Image (spheres, rainbow, N blue to C red):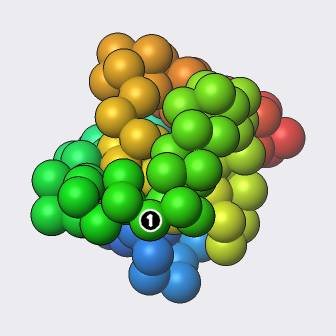
Amino acid sequence: MADALVLFTAAFAAATILPFSSEVALVAALVSGMAPAMAIGVASLGNVLAVVLNYVLGYWLYERMQTKLQRSAIGAKALFWGHRYGYVMLPLSVLPIIGDPLTIVAGILRLKFLWFLLIVALLRIGRYFLIASAF
């Protein structure tokens, strides 16, 4: 149970802007004997809950910055391009460094939450599945 809590916490932290690696935590859990299905489930739950938090944070930030973004030429252009290509950028959310901030941007852009969650969750779960299947 302690291993699961550590994995959950590491996966959650890794999906924030904190410098953690959920992949390393997943491998450590697998090496320590955690069942692959359990490890994938725990890591996925932590990671997906954190990206939901990121989305909500971005949504909240937009509320605070809406007027400034729309009045600024750069802000208006960024919103336009973000709305046009927002869903296309979501697969990049699994990349290191730029990935997790993109989940905040998705909230700022007000991408449809269900589509956001579906795309991001499937990609993150898939990544964990691929890593676990290597063991």
| Viewer-nearest residue: 31 or 40 | 40
SS state under label 1 = loop
Which residue is under mark 1? 72
Residue 135 visible at all: yes
Q: Is residue 113 left or right of residue 41?
A: left
Q: Is residue 1 above or below residue 13?
A: above
- Residue at x 59% of width, y 71% of height: 21
Residue 72: quadrant of the picture = bottom left
Q: Tell me the residue at 72%/45% (across/down).
A: 92
For label 1, count other residues whose C-alpha is less than 10 Å away and answer few (under 14), some (14-19) or many (20+): few
In the image, residue 52 above or below residue 15: above
Would you say residue 125 is visible in this rendering?
Answer: no
Locate residue 123, reporting x and y percent: 63, 30
> Looking at the image, which is closer to me, 95 or 89?
89
* Rendered view: 44 above or below 4: above
User: x and y percent of residue 57 in the render?
Assistant: 23, 58
Instruction: Indicate the amino acid at tag 1.
Output: Ser
In the current view of this chain or complex, which residue is farthest to the right?
134
Q: Residue at image x 54%, y 32%?
A: 83
Q: Quadrant of residue 110?
A: top left
As drawn, 119 above or below 28: above
Residue under the point 77% across and 34% down: 130
Q: Residue 52, percent across and down? A: 29, 43
